[in-house]
Image: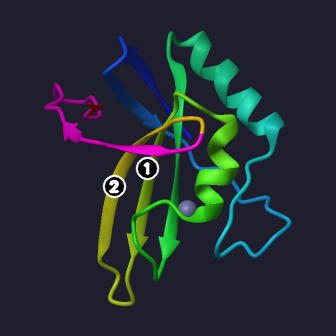
Amino acid sequence: MLGGRIHGVASASVLEVRPAANRTAHDGHSRFAIDPAEVARCEGELLLRGLDLIGFFHSHPGGSPYPSTYDVHDASAWPGYIHCIAAVDAAGRTQTRWYRVEARSWAEAQCEVEKAAIGESPACRIS
Ligand SMILES: [Zn+2]
């Protein structure tokens, strides 16, 4: 799950990344699901610190960093959220792409890592 801040319609900053277990009842290699209680708990913890739940990330082991048919269908309930897909090949190389989820489509977004002050984690600005 991705915590951060929304900057209007066209930009957001990812300030925190939180792992979540894949709870899908289907093949966990091609689909994923996060327990709604875990999403609610994460969102509440982020809100207490002035952050929002702005999106999600998942991997495509051995696949491509483009949304699958399942991704587009399953994420239709989350319009307006950021989504990151990391594809990992057999050699361990990772290719990452970012998207803004719409009702029935995913629009590719750009991610720029911002410099951080010493002792702080860098932010990832999505536009
Ligand atoms: Zn996927």
Residue 46 % position (x, y): 58, 21
Residue located 59% across and 35% down the image: 103
Residue located 35% across and 11% down the image: 8
Quadrant assignment for the C terminus: top left
In the picture, measured across the screen, residue 124 lies left or right of residue 79, that is: left
Residue 79 % position (x, y): 58, 31
Residue located 75% across and 27% down the image: 40
Residue position for label 1: 84
Residue located 80% across and 45% down the image: 35
Q: Is residue 5 above or below residue 104?
A: above
Q: Residues within 10 Å of mark 1 (few under 14, many from 20)?
A: many
Q: Quadrant of ligand 1?
A: bottom right
In the picture, measured across the screen, residue 22 lies left or right of residue 4, that is: right
Residue located farthest toward the front when viewing the structure as drawn: 104
Q: Earlier in the sequence, mark 2 or mark 1?
A: 1
Residue 83 % position (x, y): 47, 44
Q: Residues within 10 Å of mark 2 (few under 14, many from 20)?
A: some
In the picture, measured across the screen, residue 122 lies left or right of residue 40, that is: left
Task: Give me the disc on residue 97.
Answer: 2
Q: Is residue 116 magenta?
A: yes
Tell me which amino acid carries mark 1: Cys
Q: In the rendered structure, are the residues bearing label 2 and label 1 in contact, judged by CB atoms less than 8 Å apart?
A: yes
Q: Is residue 72 above or below residue 99?
A: below
Tell me which amino acid carries mark 2: Arg
Q: CA distance from mark 2 to mark 1?
A: 6 Å
Magenta span: chief secondary structure: loop
Q: Is residue 51 magenta?
A: no
Residue stretch in magenta: 104-124
Q: Nearer the viewer, residue 90 or 17?
A: 90
Residue 76, by quadrant, is: top right
Residue 51 % position (x, y): 50, 16
